[in-house]
Amino acid sequence: MLLTWTPEPDLTVARAARLCYSPGGEAQVAEGMAQDEVCRLVARLWEAGHLSPFEHASFQFYVEGSRAMLAQLTRHRIASYSVQSLRYVTPDRPCYVLPPAFRKDPALREIYRSEMARAFGVYRRLLDEGAPPEDARMVLGQGVATRLVATFNARSLHNFFRLRCCRRAQWEIRRIAYDMLREVKRVAPALFERAGSPCESEGRCPEGALSCGRYRHLRRVPAGRGRRGPDPGHSDGDRLE
């Protein structure tokens, strides 16, 4: 969920960029700009690879997911993260992410749920025996749920979407990336018009022999026919249990 963002993010970036290319000062930077002018300037920045003005717009998100997802998300270092701490928050029941493969297979689902319940039982026993919460949490697995607030600037988000909207990204981080992309496109359509995986945003695939093959399909489809927008990135089995 998008919590807050820089007011008028498209205009904020365009104003910063306009100063780079004009002799004016404060008055010119503070001037308003028509939306079509903003869109043209932002598109020119993208084409030129001049993305530092994108850093003037920031976006804050509330995110829920697994600890495995958190490890991937925080690899994107040009961002700020505040994570719910198991040192200070003690869950009263097992709360975890159920992978799609387990949701679709009753046998796998039962094994997973049973082991999650067992791990949570050990966690509670350790706490009851006086173990420090920071030590007791060690028995909880990668699937345990967590909550966080994350703040990115627009340039860093482009990098995040480029990597995590790709079909080769892990399903959970890809779902979150597409959720975030939909949210920012709503409030900053010019900044994120070309955001997404390289096959969508750049018309190419950098994965080489590891490519999923989607780019070859997109190249065969005439523009405007058969392209239903970006890969939705969703699965039917990633909700918290």
Image: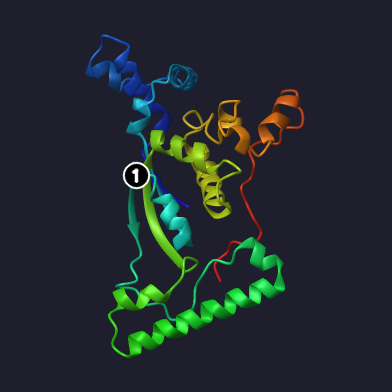
Residue furthest to the left: 26
Nearest the viewer among 211 and 238 is: 211
Residue sitting at 36 percent across and 85 percent down? 126
| Whole-percent x, y for residue 5 in the image | 38, 42
Residue sitting at 55 percent across and 31 percent down? 206
- Among the 4 quarters of the image, the one containing residue 45: top left
| Whole-percent x, y for residue 154 in the image | 40, 35
- Among the 4 quarters of the image, the one containing residue 220: top right
Nearest the viewer among 102 and 37 is: 102
Query: Local crowd at mark 1 within 10 Å, few (<14), some, or many (≥20)?
Result: few
| Whole-percent x, y for residue 118 in the image | 51, 83
Residue position marked by numbered label 1 in the rendering: 77
Nearest the viewer among 104 and 40 is: 104
Query: Relative to 146, is 185 on the left or the right?
Result: right
| Whole-percent x, y for residue 111 in the image | 62, 77
Give the answer, above or below, for where 91 lies relative to 33: below
